Image (tube, rainbow, N blue to C red):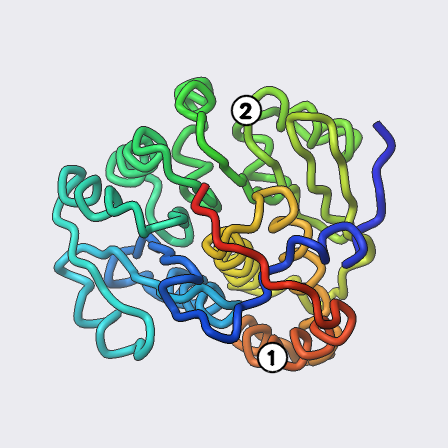
Amino acid sequence: MTARDNSPDLWRDSFPNPAAAGSKYDRGHAVVLGGPMAATGAARLAARACLRIGAGLVSIACDPSSLMVYATALQAVMTKVIRDEAAFAACIEDPRITVVLMGPAAGVNDRTRNLVLAALKAGKACVLDADAITVFKDAPDELFDAIASPVLLTPHAGEFARLFGEVSDREASALRAARTSGAVVLLKGRDTVIAAPDGRIVVNREAPPWLATAGSGDVLAGFAAGLVAQGMAVFEAACAAAWIHAQCSRAFGPGLIAEDLEAQLPAVLRDLSGQIGQTAPVPFRPQ
């Protein structure tokens, strides 16, 4: 299938448009897996991005040892203490939780692996980034066999190689990975490729060079999770997140750091809202 260039024309009809009479509970609840006390920044970036793009509620699920950092550093983002896999499974079994984002600085360890598998077993829509990808490098089939719910993988080229082998042709490699894993794959880079198992391929071309900065990918994962939380299908959410992420970078320009992406988002969304126009609100449908 021929790749299409990414633009709002591809996903504007499914972009979340909150109803005037709606509430935060109509906009989904995202859970972000928090990292250890010495590495909380990535999850915080992802959680704030998720909330800023429109998720009605966002919680960080964290170990008791890092609770104080998350609780004091975040305001609108809530915290949920999880001591083990059983506590995490109990946390996410609530049907009102509509997406789980795992990986940013979560740690490449058994805890991350087991919590990813618990979320997939629960049938939750998932965004898997960074450590949630790398942790399966020695047993990728264990991850692929567990994928049955809507899942987005967001690797850069190095993380991609750990599960799927080296990238050759970016479009062909991403499509092969999507068909192998059963997940939508967003292969990050200057030309970001979004591929679905059904053969759809979209390329977000010529991302600004300022996006090559620490934490940028965590924000992208948060944007995607926030859109999925609101009921947007994973492939369309990935395309929209990649486009918005690049637009936020263009709006800020040189000197960008990851925190600036979220700060640019309201203006980008206002402009996008004008392009979408007065369309009917998108009904919330948990995946």
Mark 2 or mark 1, earlier in chain: 2
- Say whether marks 2 and 1 touch (CB < 8 Å): no
Q: Is residue 32 left or right of residue 242?
A: left
Is 91 rendered above or below residue 17? above
- Residue at image mark 2: 181
- Mark 2: which amino acid? Ser
Residue 257 in the image: x percent, y percent? 58, 74
Give the quarter of the figure containing the C terminus: top left
93 and 109: which is toward the camera: 93
Q: Name the element at disc 1.
A: helix
Residue 155 in the image: x percent, y percent? 57, 42
- Residue at image mark 1: 266
Which residue is rendered at x = 60% and y = 79% of the image?
A: 266
Which residue is rendered at x = 41% and y = 62% of the image?
A: 26
Which residue is rendered at x = 83% and y = 27% of the image?
A: 1
Is 231 rendered above or below residue 125? below
Quarter residue 39 falls in = bottom left
